[in-house]
Amino acid sequence: MISEFAKSRTNAQGVNFSILLYHYHVLFGFYYGWFAQGTDTTFYWNLGDRFRQFEFETWFSTYGTHNNFVFFLNYPFSKVLGLDFWTGTFLYASVSAWAFILIYMVGEELFKVEPIKLYGFKIWPLILLLPSLHFWSSGIGKDALVFLFISMFFYGLRDLRKHVFLVGLSLILLYHVRPHMAFIVFLSTAFMLVLDSKLHSSYKLIFFSLSLVGFFLIYGQVLEFLKIDEINTENIEAVFNKSSTNLSYGRSFVDMSSYPYPLKVFTFLFRPLFFDAHNFTSFLNSFENLIYLILAGTVLKKVNPIKAYQKSPVHLKILLITFLLASIAFAGSLSNFGIMVRMKNMTFVYFLIFLIYIYQVHLLERREYIIRKITEAQKRKAVLARKVGG
């Protein structure tokens, strides 16, 4: 199935890499299942545990948002078919692997320079093999579903007229799992329409109307999720303070109460680093965060991100804004490295794709500049030769 999907969209090498992505992701799915068995993964698959027990008489009695929608998806497999935890792990890993295949296909369309290297290392598509991206998006639960639904949205936005159903379905599913993330995606879409001037006015009107409708439909759910009456500075600050207090436990805790907000965002995006590591997982995260820091620092030093953003395609702009809004929101409310890495993982891959894309634009512009200078020099040399010959 994967090879058939990939054959019409990429070359033989791309097909092989897509198959590699699938098997690589499934491998991490089983590792995550072993790592997290007995926690929320078991809770979601069994539709409860010894501490949180529910009585669902029928499949449709599970329907709802947040945890209930995960129960709704799992019920036929767990309760009706009686599949065990490891079969569920395989199903989740197999389905969520499609997120990386979709992202890879979009990347193949975006990146025309082959290969794209930084400090001699090929960064695309090898960036998609970094372990944390797969680890947190392969297990039973919300994280894998959200990662998949956002990737479906990203893939569909490339050609909205062709994939309008996929875009709509991905947003509906995202809303059911994490309404606040659907809220951020709708908000990002509206922002993009205001900031982007290249989109045709008719598409702007359609997008903007749908975004507003979605915005107001989800607004109530977000207030309920945050347990506040309205969104204002005072209420949001109270939520952030409460969240930080609730998460101030364990060796993964980091006290950011005195941090200025930019440093909180930096901590959310690029820590833990090696001085924060206390086990193998955090050490691995530190290594990857160092790679992210080097990539971001090098690219942003060479490229003006504002100008590069203006040259980016619409679907990449929307996901970049989604990443920025999510990062700003979560950076103020989280103080536990483990949870930070999970929340970051939902959208961080799109920041990486943006960095690679603008770096590619930089390489192409530099190449064109060099070619233009060589051509001009050759013309001057030819003119000079004719003058000397005459």
Image: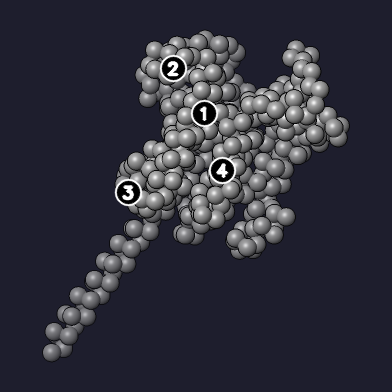
Point out residue 32 in the picture as x, y percentages from the top left corner: 71, 31
Q: Which mark is residue 218?
A: 1
Q: Is residue 170 visible?
A: yes
Is 304 in front, or is 115? 304
Q: Secondary structure at mark 1?
A: helix
Mark 4 / mark 1, whichever is N-terminal: 4
Q: Nearer the viewer, residue 235 or 250?
A: 235
User: What residue lies at 33% left-to-right and 63% top-to-bottom?
Assistant: 368
Instruction: Bin the neighbour count of mark 4 within 10 Å (Cα to Cα): few under 14, some 14-19, many 20 and up.
Output: some
Kindly indicate the quadrant of the structure image that contains residue 46: top right
Residue 197: mark: 3
Q: Nearer the viewer, mark 1 or mark 3?
A: 1
Query: Residue 104 vs residue 210: left or right?
Result: right
Earlier along the polypeptide chain: callout 3 or callout 4?
A: 4
Residue type highlighted by circle 2: Glu
Nearer to us of marks 3 and 2 is 2
Question: Crowding near pointer 2: few (<14 within 10 Å), some, many (20+)?
Answer: some
Task: Read off the residue under disc 4.
Answer: 168
Under circle 3, the secondary element is loop
Mark 3 → mark 2, Cα distance in angstroms: 32 Å
Using the image, determine if residue 299 lies above or below residue 72: below
Q: Position of residue 174 (x, y in %)?
A: 59, 35
Residue on which disc 2 sits: 230
